[in-house]
Image (cartoon, grey):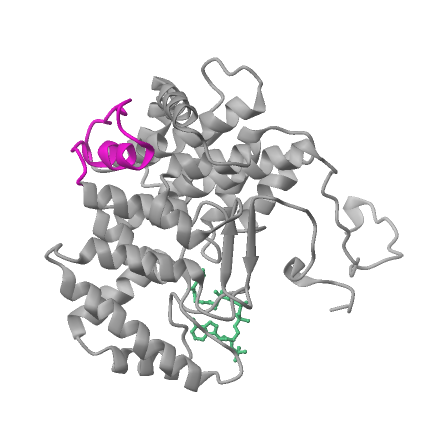
């Protein structure tokens, strides 16, 4: 590969942003000026999305009105439900259903105002995911409740039952923690789409497509399978040794940017610890923590020159599973949160836009001459 090609755009700076800062060496994540640890322990998802969209935390009145605005934009029409039912009946994955549902988000009286469209897209993602899931389970969809917050509504629409405080708090911490993370692949995709002066619905739809891939949004499902297997076998050391000796990777470890423990892993481990304490499943969480210790030590011996630490997916898996999100919806639940970041990045890109247009080094043939089809 030629020297001036930066595969995967690694290390290439293509935008300025005031939304989040990722420091991979120090293991720090700042969202809207606040360390992620501070937000995860205190904020609701609505507060953090307001912070991203407006550049500051809302006052109490502003928060009430933002919550009401989201509540008014949550419902989806019968046509969209039909598409989601068909996706569920055909056994399509949740991310395919979500892509179709987000693409239809501007049905039903959109004004063309991109800031309002951002609220609509953010509001509708949990409804789309939960509706698809209800059909997958052979159940009727559950309408959102205007008095419930974003996190509580998602759990309510999934199960049809009022979620516990403990579950809402656990999910809220997750949604706040993963809402934005620099120019990850899906966020860059959304910015690229709107850089053509396209629109927020198109940007978010493309971002869902980018998040679907296993290299970006697909790891927490396999992490959970691994943790459950280890919990049953009760022997993390053997599992770690067999995996690494077999040339396979341990899911939930390693990161393109972080060279120390992902700060989101620390936040989510605390949220998961609080959730599991007194939940009746505390033993499972003990296995998770024991496994992390064994794995980190083994990875350091396995690859002494390459720091391989715990990433965000490791604690995402037990936390989401604990609060009642089915593993088939883990990646879609990532989107329930990250859509806040995608839409804020779309608005930031539109406010100071230059079309994204990199170049490629041509490596194909040259000098060919045309041969008529009957002579080929
Ligand atoms: N377990 C074991 N070895 C690992 C590893 C893991 N989880 N992650 C990386 N490595 C090893 C690789 O085998 C490679 O070794 P090599 O140089 O001998 O081939 C080396 O570390 C560098 O890996 P590389 O794939 O170049 O790193 P990357 O920055 O491109 O990839 C990830 C980052 C996250 C894709 C990678 O660490 C990974 O696959 N992790 C497991 C999946 C996961 O948890 N994904 C969720 C990410 S949030």
**Please, what is the dominant secondary structure of the magenta stretch?**
loop
Q: Nearer the viewer, residue 242 or 22?
A: 22
- Give the extent of the magenta segment: 138-164
Give the residue displayed 43% in from the left and 61% down from the top: 263
Q: How many marks?
A: 0
Give the residue displayed 29% in from the left and 54% down from the top: 271
Give the residue displayed 46% in from the left and 74% down from the top: 308
The x and y percentages for residue 48 are 44, 39
Taking the magenta stretch, the answer to whether it contains residue 142 is yes
Quadrant of the image occupied by residue 364: bottom right
Judge from the rendering whether residue 211 lies leftward or rightward of residue 270; answer left or right.
right
Judge from the rendering whether residue 32 lies leftward or rightward of residue 360; answer left or right.
left
Say if residue 273 shows up in the picture.
yes
Q: Nearer the viewer, residue 369 or 251?
A: 251
Q: Nearer the viewer, residue 106 or 298?
A: 298
Compared to residue 95, the image places residue 118 above or below, namely above
Compared to residue 47, the image places residue 4 above or below, namely below
Q: Which residue of the protein is positioned furthest toward the left in this rendering?
A: 280
Judge from the rendering whether residue 128 lies leftward or rightward of residue 15; answer left or right.
left
The x and y percentages for residue 343 are 53, 35
Give the residue displayed 38% in from the left and 67% down from the top: 251
Say if residue 135 shows up in the picture.
no
The x and y percentages for residue 222 are 33, 61
């Amino acid at each position: 590969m030629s020297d001036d090609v930066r595969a995967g755009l690694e290390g290439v700076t293509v935008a300025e942003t005031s939304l989040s800062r990722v420091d991979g060496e120090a293991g720090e994540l700042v969202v809207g000026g606040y360390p992620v640890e501070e937000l995860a322990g205190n904020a609701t998802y609505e507060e953090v999305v307001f912070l991203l969209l407006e550049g500051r935390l809302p006052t109490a009145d502003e928060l009430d009105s933002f919550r009401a605005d989201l509540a008014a934009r949550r419902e989806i029409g019968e046509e969209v439900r039909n598409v989601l039912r068909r996706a569920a009946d055909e056994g399509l994955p949740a991310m395919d259903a979500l892509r179709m549902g987000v693409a239809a988000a501007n049905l039903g009286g959109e004004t063309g105002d991109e800031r309002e469209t951002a609220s609509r897209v953010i509001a509708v993602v949990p409804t789309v995911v939960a509706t698809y899931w209800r059909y997958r389970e052979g159940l009727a969809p559950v309408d959102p409740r205007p008095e419930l917050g974003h996190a509580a509504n998602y759990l309510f629409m999934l199960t049809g039952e009022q979620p516990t405080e403990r579950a809402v708090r656990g999910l809220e911490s997750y949604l706040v923690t993963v809402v934005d993370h620099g120019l990850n692949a899906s966020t860059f995709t959304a910015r690229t789409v709107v850089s053509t002066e396209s629109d927020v619905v198109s940007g978010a739809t493309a971002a869902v497509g980018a998040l679907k891939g296993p290299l970006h949004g697909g790891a927490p499902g396999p992490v959970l399978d691994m943790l459950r297997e280890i919990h049953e076998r009760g022997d993390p050391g053997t599992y770690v040794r067999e995996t690494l000796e077999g040339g396979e990777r341990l899911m939930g470890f390693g990161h393109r940017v972080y060279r120390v423990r992902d700060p989101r892993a620390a936040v989510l481990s605390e949220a998961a610890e609080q959730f599991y304490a007194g939940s009746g499943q505390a033993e499972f969480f003990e296995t998770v923590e024991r496994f992390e210790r064994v794995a980190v030590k083994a990875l350091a011996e396995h690859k002494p020159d390459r720091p391989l630490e715990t990433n965000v997916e490791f604690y995402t898996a037990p936390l989401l599973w604990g609060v009642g999100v089915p593993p088939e919806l883990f990646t879609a639940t990532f989107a329930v949160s990250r859509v806040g970041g995608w839409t804020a990045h779309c608005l930031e890109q539109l406010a100071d836009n230059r079309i994204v247009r990199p170049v490629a080094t041509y490596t194909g043939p040259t000098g060919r001459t045309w041969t008529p089809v009957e002579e080929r």
